[in-house]
Amino acid sequence: GVTYSNIGEVHRLMGNYEKALAFHQKALNIQENVQCNPLESATTYINLGETSREMKDYSAALIYFEKGLEIREKKLPKYHPDLAVVYHNMAKLYLATRKYSMAMKNIQQAVEIAQEKLPSSHPHLL
């Protein structure tokens, strides 16, 4: 499943969104039907969210991000950097849909985690 999701990410980065979705869905089908680490499924949901966001399918993106976030919030400590990634992705989604207060809320959560976990000179904080 992880390998299919990684291939999907390569297709997403190349702009081949339909192929990316197909590989991410294949990954998710495997991950949901085989005993695997739930964090792997969370990553696939988030990858599906990013692909959907880039395709401007914002409602699907939000559903995928929320599923991935729900899993990560249950499995990871409060200030884990992987949570910051989801909050950042959701902020980009809310900016694209002009939901500025939600974008601000999510980016503030991402920054809070980054400030807790990264040195002040880290490029992501700057």
Image (cartoon, rainbow, N blue to C red):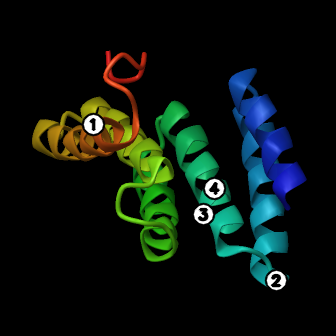
Residue 90 location, quadrant = top left
Find residue 33 and name its label: 2
Find residue 42 and name its label: 3
Query: How far, Cα to Cα, is label 4 from label 1?
Result: 20 Å
Q: Which residue is situated farthest in the left direction here?
A: 101
Which is more foreground, mark 4 or mark 2?
Answer: 4
- Is 56 above or below relative to 27? above
Q: Secondary structure at mark 4?
A: helix
**Residue 22 % position (x, y):** 80, 50
Looking at the image, do the residues carrying marks 4 and 2 touch, with CB atoms under 8 Å apart? Answer: no
Q: How many marks?
A: 4
What amino acid is at disc 4? Answer: Thr
Tell which of 96 and 83 is nearer to you.
Answer: 83
What amino acid is at disc 3? Answer: Ala
| Earlier sequence position, callout 2 versus callout 3 | 2
**Residue 98 % position (x, y):** 19, 33
Tell me the crowding category of disc 1: few under 14, some 14 to 19, or many 20 or more residues within 10 angstroms, Cα based: some
Which residue position is annotated with label 4? 43
Query: How far, Cα to Cα, is label 2 from label 3?
Result: 14 Å
Which residue position is annotated with label 1? 111
| Earlier sequence position, callout 4 versus callout 1 | 4
Which is more foreground, mark 4 or mark 1?
Answer: 1
Query: How far, Cα to Cα, is label 1 from label 2?
Result: 35 Å
| Earlier sequence position, callout 1 versus callout 2 | 2
